[in-house]
Image (cartoon, rainbow, N blue to C red):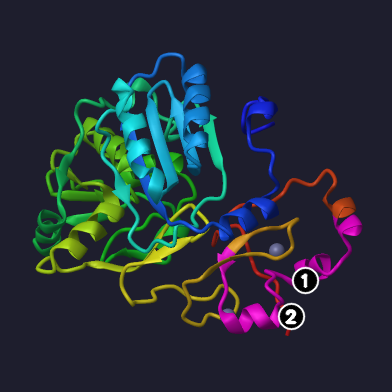
Amino acid sequence: MDPNGGKKGMFNKLGRKEAILRLEQESFNRVTVSFYRYIIIENVESFRDKLYSEWKSLSAYGRIYLAKEGVNAQMSVPEHNWDKFVENLNSYDVLKDIPFKIAVEDDGKSFFKLTIKVRNQIVADGLSENDYDVTNVGKHLGAREWNEAIENGATVVDMRNHYESEIGKFKGAICPEVETFKEELPLVKEMLNGKENEQVLLYCTGGIRCEKASAYLKNYGFNNVSQLHGGIIDYVRQIKEDNKIQNKFLGKNFVFDERRGERISSDVISNCHQCGETCDIHTNCRNVNCNLLFLQCQKCKDKHESCCSVECIEVANMSEDQRKKLRKGVENKKIYYSHKKVKLNLKE
Ligand SMILES: [Zn+2]
Ligand SMILES: [Zn+2]
């Protein structure tokens, strides 16, 4: 399926390579920003088309999800068009004064095209309407209050997926071994069994997942649920602005763009998936038929030719025609590394 909904004429036809090259040749800076809001959007498709043409004319890139329940966007906007972009957002009631999260470690190379997708939900949670009440969410905590709650012994839960928490997390946080938010919610409910009256702290990348997770837990009898306001992104902004607030986040914050992760503290908490050395650098397997995302240290990168397995080295070194033949009918893995699914097969 065409991710842009079949309207090819209107959308970006540039290939990936050309798009990356175009980005690299830009002479201006970009601001990496994310924002979300739960709001009712009528006529999602026509709203998408409108935003696409307006944002495209501002050379904004990014990945945006639109649904009847709201908007969830990660974008990069040319610095010189930033004011116009904000003006554009403010011209819509549903986007007016939407809170921004601006990335800290930012070279502006986070996206190389604009994609706006229409979805049923902005966060796939698999919940039914009876599972939560959006008007009854957890208490939002700023960085200072968040630290205090941790010091007071609250239970901290990472609401992200395993490949995100693997490279960075709050010290002592529970990090469920899950690949989707959908499977995480019931699991967390189970893990917290017995803590209904204790303080529970939830966090995620930008706060959007906790909005639903906290409503869900409260609906199931957890009485003292709080969530990190604006997620890790805004926590980092706050500790950078006020050096009296101590950083309690270890390692890197995983991000879904070309950067893969931004470093928050110098701790490296994960290991190379091939040799086990300390490493928190994500790589996509060089075999494009595989494309697996995994942690690979520089030594292994050299030794295994940027591949995840012996088979992939073989395929990666084939001609494009041979590779295409092999690929025919086989679904691209493209999945992220999972402890459950993947055993890396190495050459000695
Ligand atoms: Zn290694
Ligand atoms: Zn591979």
Q: Is residue 181 left or right of residue 283?
A: left
The alpha-carbon separation of the residues under discs 1 and 2 comes to 10 Å
Q: Quadrant of ligand 2?
A: bottom right
Q: Is residue 309 magenta?
A: yes
Label 2 sits on residue = 347
Residue at 12% over, 44% down: 197
Label 1 sits on residue = 313
Q: Is residue 88 left or right of residue 114?
A: left
- Please rate how many residues cluster around mark 2, counting C-alpha atoms within 10 Å: few if below 14, some from 14 to 19, many from 20: few
Q: Position of residue 3 (x, y in %)?
A: 63, 33
Image height of 217 relative to 259, above or below: above
Nearer-N-terminus badge (1/2) = 1
- Amino acid at pointer 2: Lys
Image height of 198 relative to 106, above or below: above
Quadrant into which the N terminus falls: top right
Q: Which residues are magenta?
A: 294-323
Decide which of 198, 138 is in the foreground and name it: 138
